[in-house]
Image (cartoon, rainbow, N blue to C red):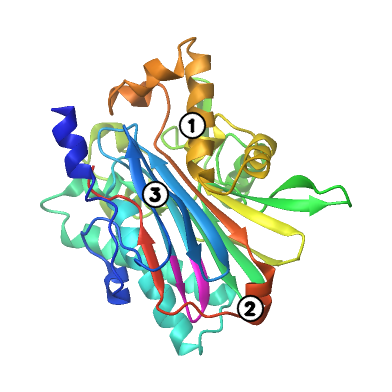
Amino acid sequence: MLGAFMNLLSLCWSNNTDSANTSGGGGGGYGSSSNGAAFGRDGLLWYHDIGKYGSGEFSMAVVQANRVLEDQSQIESGRFGTLVGVYDGHGGPDVARYVCDNLFRHFQALSDENNSVVTADIIQRAFSETERGFTALVSEQWNSQPNLATVGTCCLVGVISQQTLFVASLGDSRLVLGKKVGSTGEIAALQLSEEHNANLAAVRQDLKMSHPNDPQIVVLKHGVWRVKGIIQISRSIGDVYLKHPQFNTERINAKFRVPEPMDMPFLSATPSILIHPLDPNDSFLIFASDGLWEHLSNEKAVDIVNRHPRNGSAKRLIKAALQEAAKKREMRYSDLHKIDKKVRRHFHDDITVIVLFLNHDLISKGTVQDPPLSIRSALEH
């Protein structure tokens, strides 16, 4: 049975040179057959070991732990530059899939209107349009699928354009830069994304300041700080039951309902945005969902990428995280590898990793990728 299942999944990474497919809607993976990307699988692990994008090379991998894969991700290169998105879903895959299908579409339309010049405002508007669209979808399907209101996703987006990196984040996925320091070739790890997890004191303080009349805005539950005692992150796309009172009713599952009145949204969909001018010493970028960072530090991840060949970098990071997960349970990695999805979630979360290696000659020339590159992670698992 598992063999048949895995044969089916061989279709989940595919190549397609038609960039119109990036607006998506239900296919498996998209990509360009000319980008040099090889794809493969190893149990519940899927990977592109190495490929080319507009500003260098990339490595991409995802491992499934949940019954249905809740992580989604994409790499898009075109006239504007390159966009990378990592979407770590919770409560189900629906919002992560929706964002993967729609956020880049909104971003591309807005950047085209601005002659492919990328700004923080364009990225912010793309997030807003995506949130608005999903909220409308929940409203349309409220009678038939009310629990769609309880699904959400973290979002981490990086855009390389005109020698500048724009980083937008909601939730607790993370972007870490590997940067050369000194004359010895040593690589330092610099985190470029802001995280929005209630277990961070600064996030709890922000929530309390923005909800001064709500003493229960953050609650310590089973040793974990949660917004309204329910969810750890303070920003997301989706989770509309925590943003709009009309969806916080008896129609959704009782474990999600908030008894207190909602005078203002408990969660935000406004991303934090950082603008980082790229420097020749900036060597590579690691984009990853929270599942990786539960087991690897920023420094360890950068060290692993730096000490090994580029080929297979993303897969190597995931395997290092899984080895740490196995060690914590006092078991061998080979035994963890045999555990199937759903049960695997007791040991680790879904993990997505994308490593971008930066070619500063290409970046400084403003090279345009033609045909445009579009690669999506596996969709149906």
Determine the CA span between mark 2 and mark 3.
29 Å
Q: Position of residue 227 (x, y in %)?
A: 48, 39
Q: Which residue is mark 1?
A: 319
Q: Secondary structure at mark 2?
A: loop
The mark nearer the N terminus, 2 or 3, is: 3
- Residue 153: image tag: 3
Q: Secondary structure at mark 3?
A: strand
Determine the CA span between mark 3 and mark 1.
24 Å
Give the mark toward the camera: 2 or 3: 2
Q: Position of residue 195 (x, y in %)?
A: 59, 47
**Can residue 89 be seen at all in this image of the molecule?**
yes
Give the mark toward the camera: 3 or 1: 1
Q: What residue is shown at x 44% (from left), y 71% (from top)? A: 126
Q: What residue is shown at x 34% (from left), y 55% (from top)? A: 244
Q: Is 265 situated above or below 159?
A: above
- Kind of residue at badge 2: Gln
- Kind of residue at badge 1: Lys
- Kind of residue at badge 3: Thr
Q: Is 335 situated above or below 263?
A: above
Q: Which residue is mark 2?
A: 162
Q: What residue is shown at x 18% (from left), y 48% (from top)? A: 146
Give the mark toward the camera: 2 or 1: 1
Q: Position of residue 170 (x, y in %)?
A: 51, 53
- Dividing the picture into quarters, in which one does residue 167 lie? bottom right
The mark nearer the N terminus, 3 or 1, is: 3
Residue in front for this viewpoint, 360 or 254 = 360
Residue 321 as seen in the image, left or right of residue 61: right
The mark nearer the N terminus, 2 or 1, is: 2
**Can residue 251 be seen at all in this image of the molecule?**
no
Question: Local crowd at mark 2 within 10 Å, few (<14), some, or many (≥20)?
Answer: some
* Segment colored magenta: 76-83
Question: Local crowd at mark 3 within 10 Å, few (<14), some, or many (≥20)?
Answer: many
